[in-house]
Image (cartoon, rainbow, N blue to C red):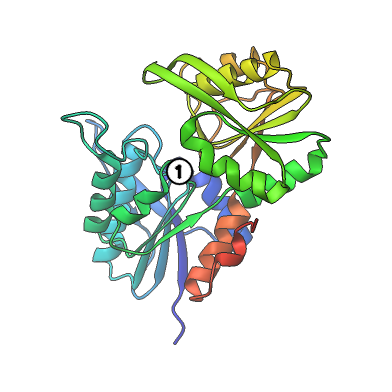
Amino acid sequence: MAREVKLFSGEATRYLAENIALSYGLPLGDVEVSRFSDGEFSPYFEETVRGCDVFIIQSTFSPTDNLFELLLLIDAAKRASAHYITAVIPYFGFARSDRKDKPRVAIASKLVANLLTAAGVTRVMTMDLHAPQIQGFFDVPVDHLDASSIFVPYIKNLNLPNLLIAAPDMGGVHRAREYAKFFNAEMAICDKHRKRANEVASMQVIGDVTGKDVILVDDIVDTAGTLTKAAELLVEKGANTVRAFCTHAVLSGKAYETIENSKLTELIVTDTIPLKKKSAKIVQLSTAELFSYAIRRVYEYSSISNLFVKS
């Protein structure tokens, strides 16, 4: 007898989960959350998951309740005898803490991986981890999807005459190089020095950007300080236009105002995190179809390699 697929969502990512379910061709399963007056909560499934392949969709952006709700849903599915439990985490929070970069600090992404495993997850699906090596923190399979399959068609449709790919910092060089190889384009690097978290002290451009239409690629845009400073510097160095493609739109603090007042022509993001408000400079692209395809292939034990853009 074929196993039944059931898709569920945490509260924070229901907007995306509904579109994933629609693309997959299944209704989204019913989840209710009971709450106590002190803020404590308990999510539960309103339908049986016994023997089913369960996919729980929840990004773990702020607040931390989103992560804890995901953990509780995984635990509930395990205790309800689900056959297989996949955590679909479009945005994997705490990924920026992936190593000990100074004494006496936690490695939060490893702790989150341990928590998910302890809760009972049997597989994890995510997109554009801040550090790809985080996959190695898990002792269960990880499907690491790539937003390039969404961004590349958009870039192609721009028909930019003098395309150049740029990394906003040294950490994004590998990602930028992959895009540059695909488009057979030149590449530049914005080398930054931070004074402290979320604050750029200085930046310089490595490479010639004169007369170029620059595409900055990154995984996360938070305060937008790095991106907008890079855009300003690139324009000063002679770039015609500067666009930024960032998978996860954290956009905290004064990010929207910073982007509106920047030299960026536009910022293109995905819907792994919901936008807090609209902006004339921000374009949001859907990941629903990509995740639905990946879920189907996981269920069918098929390869997902054809979901990646090949350079």
Task: Tell me: residue 82, above or below residue 23.
Answer: below
Q: Residue furthest left?
A: 104
Q: Residue furthest bottom?
A: 1
Task: Tell me: residue 147, above or below residue 202.
Answer: below
Residue 96 screen position, x and y as percent: 36, 36
Taking the image as shown, residue 92 lies to the left or right of residue 72, namely: right
Q: Nearer the viewer, residue 303 or 214?
A: 214
User: In the figure, residue 266 lies in which quadrant?
Assistant: top right
Q: Amino acid at mark 1?
A: Tyr
Residue 217 screen position, x and y as percent: 59, 36
Q: Nearer the viewer, residue 36 or 180?
A: 180
User: In the figure, residue 309 lies in which quadrant?
Assistant: bottom right
Q: Tell me the quarter of the image containing the N terminus.
A: bottom left
Q: Nearer the viewer, residue 226 or 254?
A: 226
Taking the image as shown, residue 109 lies to the left or right of residue 191, namely: left
Taking the image as shown, residue 25 lies to the left or right of residue 102, namely: right
User: In the figure, residue 129 lies in which quadrant?
Assistant: top left
Q: Tell me the quarter of the image containing the C terminus.
A: bottom right
- The secondary element bearing badge 1 is classed as loop
> What residue is rendered at 43% in x and 19% in y?
193
Badge 1 local density, few (<14 within 10 Å), some, or many (20+)? many
Taking the image as shown, residue 302 lies to the left or right of residue 8, namely: right
> What residue is rendered at 80% in x and 43% in y?
157
Q: Nearer the viewer, residue 179 or 113?
A: 179
Q: From this viewpoint, is residue 255 visible? A: no
- Which residue is denoted by mark 1 in the rendering? 91
Residue 220 screen position, x and y as percent: 49, 34
> What residue is rendered at 51% in x and 76% in y?
300
> What residue is rendered at 20% in x and 31% in y?
105
Residue 282 screen position, x and y as percent: 66, 28
Q: From this viewpoint, is residue 44 visible? A: yes
